[in-house]
Amino acid sequence: RNILIGLGAGGLYGAADKPDGSTIDCCPPITKTIIDFKLPDRGPLRVRRAAQDLEKDPVYLAKYKKAIALMRALPDDDPRSMAQQAMVHCSYCDGGYPQAGFSDLEIQVHFCWLFYPFHRWYLYFYEKIMGELIGDPTFALPFWNWDAPVGMYIPKIFTDPTSSLYDQYRNAAHQPPKLLDLNYGGTDDDVDDATRIKENLTTMYQQMVSKASSHRLFYGEPYSAGDDPSPGAGNIESIPHNNIHLWTGDPNQTNGEDMGAFYSAGRDPLFYSHHSNVDRMWSIYKDLLGGTDIDKTDWLDTEFLFYDEKKNLVRVKVRDSLDTRKLGYVYDNKVPIPWLEAKP
Ligand code: C2O
């Protein structure tokens, strides 16, 4: 009973709902041919590094800015364009696709066990597209290291208004050096930085370790074909992932755009680095904390569709996302993980 994407007559659906009740057309370009994804041949691994470490690496930073500038410059109907990449999130999160065989049930990749694998695939293609555009297949997406004190700010590389990595729709009160609140609920409270850092680290330890004693708690609730969407989110999705979206988006926009709403979050380059760290948490869970994969075929055989770096529409399965090395990337393992010692 794994979930499959319902395809419209033309190939894909894509009209979605914004939080304010209006609708938005998220439909990706139409294609008749769908290719089944094959794991790439083993080449050099792409190493995803912490965004704050890139400040000291002008060569890498120049590549990153160029990749995003080129992505922004692509015509809106190119599936690799920044506009279309943002639409991917909109389609899968705001009711853009029905479940195959259940036309009245939408596909929602949040608030359920699809959260980690969907976003891993999404970033995988985004990263490959960047590498393609700059002609460097080793190019890796940085991560926003919000789980460590050195990264509990909007990374500086995203805040230069003249850079392609900038987005104007962010909370003006949360620019660096404003410290991130991993439990942010919509209002800034008065807590000194040392206390906030301690709270944040405790939150990380709880979400990753002490409260992550089952697959349901870590990954989210099972979601199979025919089920209503949003059965329940896993730990990290609820806190701090959602809070960071809310904290980053501009409260003066109707729906907290960009980061504060599903349909617009992917317009901010910071979104992908936020999710790179979410994805890193999945790797840490498995590599360092003894976490395992869910063994249910309903999860393993769930399919998504993405356009790849060559503009092919590709069908992927959750089961091919479980090992980042097979997808050709790893996380910089020299980055400290201080919350491992933050047992309350
Ligand atoms: Cu698809 Cu951070 O949400």
Image: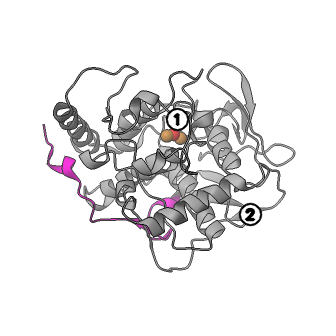
Q: Which mark is residue 221?
A: none
Q: Is residue 332 found inside the magenta-colored segment of the image?
A: yes
Pointer 1 local density, CA inside 10 Å: few below 14, some 14–19, many at least 20: many
Left or right, 195 with reference to 179: left
Pointer 2 local density, CA inside 10 Å: few below 14, some 14–19, many at least 20: some
Left or right, 333 with reference to 340: right
Residue sitting nearer the eye, 265 or 235: 265
Q: Nearer the viewer, mark 1 or mark 2?
A: 1
Residue sitting nearer the eye, 103 or 334: 334
Residue pointed to by mark 1: 259
Residue 324 drawn at (x, y percent): 44, 65
Corner quadrant of residue 37: bottom right
Residue pointed to by mark 2: 312
Q: CA distance from mark 1 to mark 2?
A: 28 Å
- Give the amino acid at mark 1: Met
Residue ID at (45%, 31%)? 232
Magenta segment: 319-344
Residue 247 drawn at (x, y percent): 42, 30
